[in-house]
Amino acid sequence: MYEGSSLWLPFLFGFVMKSLEPQKTQVYDQIGRGYVRARKPDPRIARMIHSALGDARTVLNVGAGTGSYEPVDRQVVAVEPSQAMIRQRRTGTVPVICAVAEHLPFFEAVFDASLAVLTMHHWHDRRAGLAELRRVTRHRIIIYTWDPACYDAFWLGAHYLPEVRDLDLPRFPNMQELAQQLGAIESHPVPIPHDCVDGFLGAYWRRPAAYLDPHVRRAMSGLAQLPQKIVEVAMTRLADDLRSGRWDEQFGWLRKLESIDLGYRLIIARLTA
């Protein structure tokens, strides 16, 4: 049910242990195998996330996956519903609870901060998950997400795979929804560097040939969840455009940029009593 150890962990639980087991098959049990090879923390994004945590000493990481952006200088508890993802974590790092965001097995206000990194689009009930983050957190909630208002900012979804854009638009909350659920929020753009080492969907915006690699695509949940025939047709078009030079005719100007705003946002909600 949980891995790792901590002297303070037993004092956090607000539910019986049997409630920790997720009841539904998790999407990453299917698509998360080999995830850790393609998804590594980018140090520039990590610095922004860790800075946003401020002076928080105890941190809950919800939808923690393999633990990419967990700080090493604080007491962290990770919550992850997928056993496939938990098995890929380094052993002996932080306690890992197999649970879902909508039902966090902790007492109220036991963590200084909560962290959610590119995970809300996989929650079954976003409102319930955000309410749970508020319930267990004392001071601040940090969310790394994508703003659906920027749906046309990335050439892949806008010109080759509108299906991934259509999949993601309803799955990601807009800034108004987050403010309604969390109170006043700060929204900070997260520029994606041209050599980003975390292989999420927008990471290869200046390296288009990377999307032709099925191993790279497998670590991107949006592409992994689409019908693969649709993805393969789009990738054939992209490959043709790269060979012919059509991609560079339209998007070659991107190769001169060091970073770009694709709509990724770091949200900080400072909680009051």
Image (tube, grey):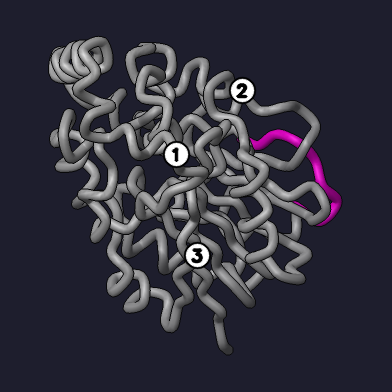
Which of marks 3 and 2 precedes in the sequence? 2
Q: From the viewer's perspective, is the residue at label 1 or at label 2 nearer?
A: 1
The disc labelled 1 sits on which kind of residue?
Answer: Lys
Q: Residue furthest bottom?
A: 273
The magenta stretch spans residue 22:
no
Tell me the CA gap for discs 1 and 2. 36 Å
Residue under numbered circle 3? 133
The disc labelled 3 sits on which kind of residue?
Answer: Leu
Image side of residue 243 versus residue 264, left or right: left
| Quadrant of residue 174 within the rendered picture | bottom left
The disc labelled 2 sits on which kind of residue?
Answer: Gln
Quadrant for the C terminus, please: bottom right
> As rendered, which of 25 and 263 lies closer to the eye?
263
In this rendering, does residue 30 appear at all? Answer: no
In the picture, the disc for residue 256 is 1
Tell me the CA gap for discs 2 and 3. 25 Å
Is the stretch drawn in magenta largely helix, strand or loop? loop
Q: Position of residue 270 (x, y in %)?
A: 56, 79
Q: From the viewer's perspective, is the residue at label 1 or at label 3 nearer?
A: 1
Which of marks 3 and 1 precedes in the sequence? 3
Residue under numbered circle 2? 88
